[in-house]
Image (cartoon, helix red, strand yellow):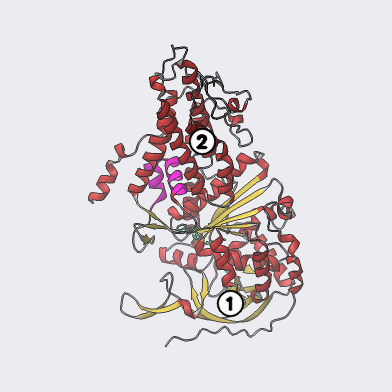
Amino acid sequence: MLRISVLRLLGRPGTSGVSLLEYISSRHYSSGPLGARDDIRGARAFFTTPIFYVNAAPHIGHLYSALLADALCRHRRLRVPSAAATRFSTGTDEHGLKIQQAAAAAGLAPTELCDRVSAQFRQLFREAGISSTDFIRTTETRHRIAVQHFWGLLKARGLLYKGLYEGWYCASEECFLPEAKVTRQSDSSGDSCHVSLESGHPVSWTKEENYIFRLSQFREPLQRWLRGDPQAIAPEPFHRAVLQWLEEELPDLSVSRKSSHLHWGIPVPGDDSQTIYVWLDALVNYLTVIGYPNAEFKSWWPTTSHIIGKDILKFHAIYWPALLLGAGMSPPHRIYVHSHWTVCGQKMSKSLGNVVDPRTCLDRYTVDGFRYFLLRQGVPNWDCDYYDEKVVKLLDSELADALGGLLNRCTAKRINPSGTYPVFCTTCFPSEPGLVGPSVRAQAEDYALVNAVATLPRQVADHYDNFQIYKALEAVSSCVRQTNGFVQRHAPWRLNWESPVDAPWLGTVLHVALECLRVFGTLLQPVTPSLADKLLSRLGVSATERGLGELCFLPRFYGHPCPFEGRRLGPETGLLFPRLDQSRAWLVKAHRT
Ligand code: ME8
């Protein structure tokens, strides 16, 4: 029979710290999109990824988190171009039992393992175009100072006490698990051992005198925060899940370990016999990177959006906000949660040998190709499955054929011999649908296209705001298809530049299609930065004309001058995105072996 895990708290829980609950007064958490907190935030935005454990090399899941944050951040920069308005941090989580054990198993000093694997993350993110402004390592001095300061605040506010803490500790997940999440299993030699029900990782019964955080005092403040700000955690099912967890008892939390057991970490200030719990250490990274404890952090903290995987939701949506409230700060502005990538239907794991190496993928599919794939196919609400054929199929159809084909159709020499952005003819395509006349050529579907592309930037922005980047890409892709339909319908290759009847309409068809491409190129910048640059350069769009503020679609249709009309196209005529299935001998080979 399984032993009931009991938490025996021998310390005397006090009552101090409750006064901070007043902080949660409802006016701080207005629920509307333009509530008081948005006013406070102004133009600034601060995005974070989780900081990743250095026990193993990065995989596509880690890259996916970083890409989501990168796309959000790049989209934000397109809206608010001031370089000083956005911060974006990522980094590595280097302390704790998990790393201590991984280093011992590899026969390395912890610092050696950390240096090696942290460098791999840094390198991967550089290659993948992750535009972070800070890469933090928790072994840095600035971080130790921040963590110890934070600890001091909790202590001074009476939120830490010493007590006996016991339970099942899972080093791999770096947390205590309740009895209900532990099961018995036979190991390879037939011996019975206890493992985490969810991850299958071993757990061990631990009984120690630790420092304990009065987490239980924060159940109601957390509920009030989440009920008062329905967008605090997105997508909504995760918000609901956290509120559901908070229906249950919220026990106090052990926040240190004996240094004789865990030496690889930050010592408790004033008590070297204890090491600070790795999750408390790790979460404070979000403050370290904005200058904490120096006052500078105060203007950035209210603008924070955390991007995390669903596996660490409890740490970010319960422990972290409670710790912040305990230290007299507000919870994070937003927590954006995504689900996981599986591989051919299975969880990615070292033991199954199915971990997908992101650097190989970037080489095979190009940086832009792989960024597009992960962000187009990754759905935050549920797990997504990875396999190579899926990447090839998607990129060939959407980037090579649909988008690349469209660009080629409008810029190829035989169709656009002058190599310019042609003139839009208002009598061929009057702004009012339904007009008839000898020179009117636009049809009802053409007005539908103009309407779809005109509203696309707003739609895309809404999808970014709701952390549904794949929907933003779906919307762009749908408009690309519609634009190809427009070109197909009017077959400019059958029109003649020499004919006074055809020429104005031919120019108009190309003008409209190029304007659509300009919108697509602008909107794709956060996801495929190089490909978008190539596309916009080919259209002759200069660096100062690529922001969302400047994105005025088809101004001639609305009676305004168009700065692009008559402009020379850029000189680069190569393929926008070469098809992959012609160059995928490696894929066939991989299947044979
Ligand atoms: O938990 N699919 O680090 P970690 C998608 N150090 N994303 C995945 C994934 C998958 N299969 N696997 C991992 C830690 N991720 C702590 C975080 S933060 C203060 C401390 C991503 O190396 C996802 O973002 O285990 C997940 O939350 C994170 O990597 C966990 O990374």
Which circle's residue, 1 or 2, is located before the other in the chain?
A: 1
Task: Give me the disc on residue 291.
Answer: none
Q: What is the x, y in percent for residue 593?
A: 23, 51
Residue occupying the point 42% across, 26% down = 490
Q: What is the x, y in percent for residue 510?
A: 48, 24
Q: Quadrant of the N terminus?
A: bottom left
Given the image, on which type of amino acid does mark 2 rest? Ala
> Where does label 1 land, which residue?
248
Q: What is the x, y in percent for residue 241?
A: 55, 67
Q: Which callout, 1 or 2, points to the residue nearer the camera?
A: 2
Quote the CA–CA distance across marks 1 and 2.
Answer: 51 Å
Q: Is residue 161 left or right of residue 360?
A: right
Furthest residue toward bottom:
1
What's the magenta region?
A: 356-376
Given the image, on which type of amino acid does mark 1 rest? Glu
Kindly state the secondary structure of the residue where label 2 is placed.
helix
Q: Is residue 326 left or right of residue 209?
A: right
Q: Nearer the viewer, residue 125 or 215?
A: 215
Q: Is residue 133 above or below residue 55?
A: above
Kindly state the secondary structure of the residue where label 1 is placed.
loop
Q: Nearer the viewer, residue 545 or 417?
A: 417
